């Protein structure tokens, strides 16, 4: 499967490149970064800047971990090239999410706020707890590194949506920015005289990169539609 890594110079992009080249199912054909690219520059593959998208070789899927400002260009480009689109970029606007839904009429699209297997399972547990603990207060606390731009995190909002879908109530959110924390999410259900905490702590960015690469592989041969990470990974 021919893969383009978009946002390749970032923390996630570097992890995707490092792990992607080791995956025999994949061929990384291009890395796209938001910065100026020196002539002939290579990481593990040819490097392009966002303004050079038209020069990209043929590819089957683009994996986007960039920023909302960079997102529209790659979604649009995948649509033009009829290539699958996998994205983990958070902080997207409603319009950008709508654009993804529209693109899913023409290409396979998978966006996830979190590509870790553990968070997919946490989300499932949160849904079950919210259903069983009717009337309990729910608070979601997320801790991330100080460089993170959006708050609450995309993962916290997705967990919150799961609660809201079941209970009809919007949970409380708390966002903490601390050192180099990769991602720590706790969902606390408080009832009269007792509470339950469901917590996921990401110790390493590679978990997200592995999940995104796996998701990209599983999109191979799929028809145009919007896909959910948990459906592809957990087979739910
Ligand atoms: P980063 O800031 O380290 O990297 C961002 C990348 O996007 C860089 O390559 C940069 O050059 C590029 N970029 C930024 N602005 C651009 C612009 N205007 N035009 C073109 N390119 C631009 O960020 P990161 O820590 O790698 O995270 C990237 C995104 O992925 C963030 O939205 C983050 O919240 C999200 N994230 C998602 C998951 C998940 O599992 N879904 C996990 C970790 C991070």
Image (cartoon, rainbow, N blue to C red):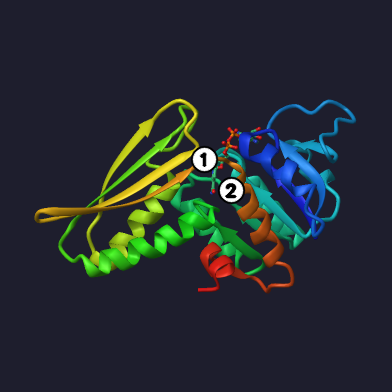
Closest to the observer, 139 or 2: 139
Residue 62 vertical placement versus 34 (above, below): below
Q: CA distance from mark 2 to mark 1?
A: 9 Å
Circle count: 2
Q: What's the residue at 59%, 61% (across, down)?
A: 110
Dot 1 crowding, Cα within 10 Å, few <14, some 14–19, many 20+ = few
Q: Is residue 171 left or right of residue 88?
A: left
Residue 228's spot in the image, x, y percent?
A: 53, 65
Rendering quadrant holding ligand 1: top right
Q: What's the residue at 64%, 34% (across, down)?
A: 10
Q: What's the residue at 18%, 66% (across, down)?
A: 134
Describe the element under mark 1 as helix, strand or loop.
loop
Dot 2 crowding, Cα within 10 Å, few <14, some 14–19, many 20+ = some
Residue 96's spot in the image, x, y percent?
A: 52, 51
- Which quarter of the figure is the N terminus placed in? bottom right
Closest to the observer, 208 or 62: 208
Q: Is residue 7 visible?
A: no
Q: Is residue 10 left or right of residue 174?
A: right
Describe the element under mark 2 as helix, strand or loop.
helix
Q: Is residue 232 left or right of residue 79?
A: left
Kindly identify which residue carries mark 2: 207
Q: Specify the farthest residue to the right.
A: 40
Kindly identify which residue carries mark 1: 203
Residue 144 vertical placement versus 28 (above, below): above
Residue 76's spot in the image, x, y percent?
A: 66, 53
**Residues at badges 2 and 1 in contact (C-beta under 8 Å)?**
yes
Q: What's the residue at 49%, 46% (across, down)?
A: 92
Residue 8's spot in the image, x, y percent?
A: 70, 38
Q: Is ligand 1 less than 8 Å from the beta carbon at label 1?
A: no
């Amino acid at each position: 499967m021919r893969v383009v890594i978009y946002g390749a110079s970032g923390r996630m992009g570097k992890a995707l490149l490092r792990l992607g080249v080791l995956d025999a199912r994949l061929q990384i054909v291009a890395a796209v970064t938001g910065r100026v690219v020196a002539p002939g520059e290579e990481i593990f593959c040819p490097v392009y800047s966002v303004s050079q998208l038209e020069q990209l070789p043929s590819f089957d899927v683009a994996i986007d971990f960039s920023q909302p400002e960079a997102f529209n260009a790659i979604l649009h480009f995948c649509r033009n090239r009829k290539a699958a689109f996998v994205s983990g970029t958070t902080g997207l606007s409603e319009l950008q999410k709508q654009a993804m839904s529209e693109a899913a009429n023409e290409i396979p699209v998978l966006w996830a706020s979190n590509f870790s297997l553990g968070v997919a399972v946490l989300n499932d547990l949160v849904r079950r707890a919210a259903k069983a603990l009717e009337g309990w207060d729910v608070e979601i606390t997320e801790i991330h590194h100080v460089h993170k731009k959006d708050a609450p995190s995309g993962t916290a909002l997705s967990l919150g949506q799961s609660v809201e879908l079941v209970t009809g109530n919007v949970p409380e959110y708390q966002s903490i920015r601390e050192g180099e924390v990769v991602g720590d999410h706790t969902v606390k259900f408080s009832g009269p005289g007792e509470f339950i905490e469901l917590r996921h702590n990401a110790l390493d960015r590679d978990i997200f990169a592995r999940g995104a690469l796996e998701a990209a592989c599983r999109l191979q041969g799929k028809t145009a539609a919007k896909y959910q990470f948990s459906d592809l990974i957990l087979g739910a």
